[in-house]
């Protein structure tokens, strides 16, 4: 299982928020690039970056912070938030992003996601952010009328490299993973599933790995890592 420490960007800083609400932001590092180096030096094989302002506004807002992260580390970076066109995707891949995450586009313009996956094989991931059984869009400020499996199945044969499934109602709350949510998605589609939202302890990683059915490919680590509730070495050991 691959672990992805998260760097959420708001106003140029590395923050954690509760349920995706920007007004709840706690700043953990004023230098996202420094934070990225810390996670890379700790041994994490990937870094998960989200432009929170960009996700809401529908365009890149924290581009300078993302570029600083890309310059600071050699581990691959996956990026989401405010990426709404093929031109946006191409720009970030040319800048050095290893995997581009598309969420709102996956709901509103799925054909663009399919085309992106064709143009950049293995470099496109789909973010499926679930609240109340429905998929949220536009930085989680709006709800669609689609359920998670319906959105995910749109890309079953498109060449998408991963599905990042976020349990919004647990995100940032340190309440533990709802393993059933992620497991149901992993069993429903052939695309590798990355779990996000609610990770509270190393036990959550063990539970993901222990579930019966198709394996969960990865997990995003957020607040628990920043507060020290999870230590990097024990998390990496548990995932291995």
Image: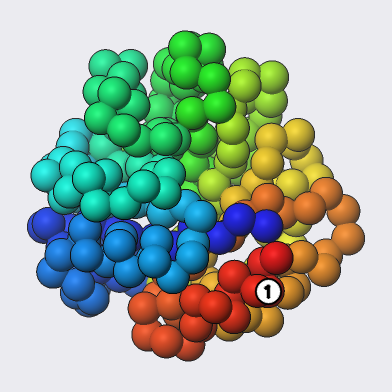
In which quarter of the view is residue 100 placed?
top left
Q: Secondary structure at mark 1?
A: helix
Residue 179 or 206: which is nearer the viewer? 206
Q: Which residue is label 1 attached to?
A: 238
In which quarter of the view is residue 159 placed?
top right
Image spot of residue 29 (x, y percent): 19, 72
Q: Is residue 196 left or right of residue 65?
A: right
Residue 155 or 46: which is nearer the viewer? 46
Image spot of residue 128 (x, y percent): 52, 44
Image spot of residue 185 (x, y percent): 71, 47
Task: Estimate how packed mark 1 is, as few (under 14), some (14 to 19) or many (20 or more) residues with alpha carbons within 10 Å.
Answer: some
Q: Residue furthest right?
A: 212
Image spot of residue 18 (x, y percent): 35, 71
Specify how the rendered protein is coloured. rainbow
Q: Is residue 2 left or right of residue 29?
A: right
Question: Does residue 212 sit above or below 100 in this rendering?
Answer: below
For the C terminus, the image quarter is bottom right
* Residue lying at 18% horizontally and 37% vertically, measured from the top left: 60
């Amino acid at each position: 299982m691959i672990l992805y420490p998260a760097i959420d960007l708001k106003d140029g800083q590395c923050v954690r928020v509760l349920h995706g609400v920007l007004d709840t932001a706690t700043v953990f590092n004023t230098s996202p690039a420094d934070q990225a180096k810390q996670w890379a030096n700790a041994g994490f094989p990937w870094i998960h970056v989200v432009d929170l302002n960009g996700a809401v506004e529908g365009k890149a807002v924290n581009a300078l912070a993302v570029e600083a992260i890309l310059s600071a580390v050699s581990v691959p970076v996956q990026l989401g938030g405010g990426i709404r066109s093929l031109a946006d995707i191409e720009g970030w891949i040319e800048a050095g992003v290893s995997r581009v995450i598309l969420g709102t586009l996956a709901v509103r313009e799925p054909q663009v996601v399919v085309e992106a996956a064709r143009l950049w094989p293995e470099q496109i991931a789909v973010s499926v952010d679930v609240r109340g059984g429905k998929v949220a869009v536009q930085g989680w400020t709006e709800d669609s009328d689609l359920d998670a499996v319906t959105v995910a199945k749109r890309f079953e044969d498109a060449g998408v490299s991963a599905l990042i499934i976020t349990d919004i109602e647990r995100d940032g709350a340190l309440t533990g993973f709802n393993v059933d949510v992620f497991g149901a998605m992993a069993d429903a589609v052939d695309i590798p599933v990355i779990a996000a939202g609610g990770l509270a302890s190393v036990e959550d990683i063990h539970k993901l790995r222990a579930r019966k059915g198709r394996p969960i490919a990865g997990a995003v680590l957020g607040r628990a890592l920043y507060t020290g509730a999870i230590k990097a070495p024990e998390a990496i050991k548990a995932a291995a």
